[in-house]
Amino acid sequence: MKLASEQTLELDEGHVTVGQSFSDDPKMTMRNINVFYAEKQAIYDVSIDITKNEVIAMIGPSGCGKSTFLRTLNRMNDTVDGCRVEGDICMDGENLYAPNLDVVELRARVGMVFQKPNPFPKSIRDNVTYGPKIHGLADTRVDLDEILEKSLRKAGLWEEVKDRLDQPGTGLSGGQQQRLCIARAIAVSPEVILMDEPCSALDPIATAKIEELIEELSQNFTIAIVTHSMQQAARVSHRTAYFHLGKLIEVNPTEQVFTMPQHQLTEAYITGRFG
Amino acid sequence: MQATDLLLSLIVLGLFSFYWSRGRSLALANPLGGIRNLHSLPSYYGLHAALWCTLPATFLLGIWLIFDEIVINGMVMTDLSPELIPSDNASYNLILNKVANIANGILPREDQPSGLLDAADNMLSLNVVSQWSITLLIITLAMSGLAWSSHKLKVDFRARPAVERVMQNLLLACACVAIFTTLGIVFSVLFESIQFFRSVPIYDFIFGLEWSPQTAIREDQVGSSGSFGAIPLFVGTLLVSAVAMFIAVPIGLMSAIYLAEYASDGVRTYAKPALEVLAGIPTVVYGFFAALTVAPFLRDLGASVGLTISSESALAAGGVMGIMIIPFISSLADDVITAVPQSMRDGSLAMGATQSETIRKVVIPAALPGIVGGIMLAISRAIGETMIVVMAAGLAAKLTANPLESVTTVTVQIVTLLTGDQEFDSPKTLAAFALGLMLFTVTLLLNIFALHIVKKYREQYE
């Protein structure tokens, strides 16, 4: 293998992802993913596994396709006009893009937290119970309240809002709103949680709380997080995937990516030479 | 000079001041090395001069136009020879008219009393004096405005903020015109209504159950006693509006949801304008469509299933009115639904909600204030709508809640009260103003109510 410094900063045509992209115990497997927005290709031939109960971080410069990639995992790209996904994405061996797959059920199993907190214009209670209600997860009011409390506790928000569950969720602070969105996502007991730059609109203290929360959640959920902040990736994730111009450059255990990157583009990015 | 000539000369003077001052500022700037050394652009100095030259003079001209005739008439009448002094208002106006007609040469000067001829001469000479003095005044004012502006024209004169202030005040003045016109209409309707309530007690009008607006010419005439109870009219109006909203709200709302949430861009490009064409059809066309097509169709349809439907039913008028209002509701609702942030939809879809669940549980509640506001506006529109009901609803004021019968509305009655030759002091005519006032009050209350609802929901959701 060549040393990083000997390689040029050009990305060769037939780039093959370096590092440990595959897993022995995968939750989701992606093979040869290509994503197009109308004519424009956003993702080139990405193959990667996501291990059960790991936190995997996707980093890379703006426009590198990391968010697009994340949104293919719960088929949120379906809502974008002209978006086309090629390749195989499987969860527990089941193809997510099979014609007979129920997207609604998939999204209940793969939850998502967005860049900007987007609580519904409803009460805190209705925000959290929204998913359980539409999926019929609770038969009685008591069950529903139980789910409500459990989810808010898991999201570390219960103590702050237990006295004002019927006030609008939009009245919370930005960090609280984002934790409310996390509570909303985990209320339907998903298997995987996708997070698309969940802290980019938050202040450092709120960010620290969310990061702490991610660590706790990883005991029960598989988490894929897109982040702009390399420090965040270093703090919360087990593995880190580096994307560049729609290609997956390197996947390795986080510690290794930030201390001994295998590819010179990864090194250039984490040392701040671009991005 | 005549007022129009004065106005023309003011425009010419204004143009001249603009170019002259602009030229002067350029001349000031050139030796200093270009216009960057001036405080403002040359056109601002020009505008400043033009505004100072024309605006005060135009204002004065306006005042003169309003008061000129009143003042001259007053002077002529006070100088009238004693034997012609009128005793009451009517003969005062008569004499004034005569004098004016003699002065303008409409009445021949022969065979007129000498007092009238003197008065006419007096009026003519006063007119001449007034015209010359206003001409002189205007020109002086315009020139002194120009002189003042050119006196101020220096390299560091801040013409730009000065012009800005004038522009702001001009805009304010235009806004005031709209507001004062509204106030004027309201007050004139109010005073005529008070006149009406002198002959018909307000209680009888608001709570009366019978409407047959006629006043007797002779005491012994048949039907000499008119009754002015507005309840049947308002019930009819509400019935027709209710039928209209019953049709317009669901169809409008659902088509808005389809257009905003489901339709592809291609469909939207054609369907939205096509729907809005409905709003462009003149109401008179809707009117005869209702009267000549829909009403007979409904009557025949009713007859075939054994229902008696009047050929001027509230159903026909309200139904067609509802169709007219569809684009109103759909385009307002479409706007507010489109304005709901995509992140709300994403949040719901990512929870595994279907599209229709997302719309019902997230998008519509978020858009509700706007939708309710739109519906309230549409109701105001339905209540005030005239042409369709004039043609398709009846004239008989029946107190009924059955949409298959013929009813009449407030607007229809206002139209029938005021069309044709009318005397303007009988309760019959004045009733139109009272009805107008009531209608205005109801719509106003409705709008206030709508705003209140919108505000309440907004507080809850933001």
Image: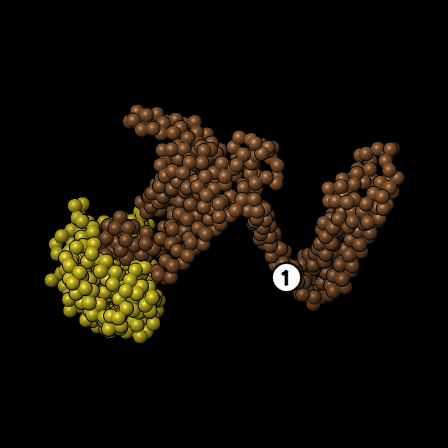
Q: Is residue A116 left or right of residue A26?
A: right
Q: Element type at marker 1?
A: helix
Check the residue under mark 1 and report the chain it is in: B
Front in this rendered view, residue A137 or B398 = B398
Q: Disc 1 designates what residue?
A: B165
- Horizontal arrangement in the rendering, residue B75 relative to residue B175 (left or right): right
Q: Quadrant of the C terminus of chain B?
A: bottom left
Quadrant in which residue B46 is drawn: bottom right
Q: Is residue B272 above or below residue A164?
A: above
**Residue B214: image location, x then y, percent:** 54, 35
Rendered location of residue A154, percent (x, y) = 20, 69
Q: Whole-percent x and y of residue A69? A: 26, 57
Tell me which residue sits at (82%, 35%) in the image: B105
Q: Which residue is drawn at 28% across and 64% down?
A: A166
Q: Chain B is drawn in which colour?
A: brown
Is residue A260 shown to the viewer in this render? no
Chain appearing in yellow on the rendered image: A
The image shows residue B95 at horizontal and vertical percentages of 78, 41
In the picture, residue B262 is in which quadrant? top left
Q: Which amino acid does label 1 sit on?
A: Arg
- In this image, A151 relative to B225: left or right? left
Does any portion of residue B144 appear in the rendered image? yes
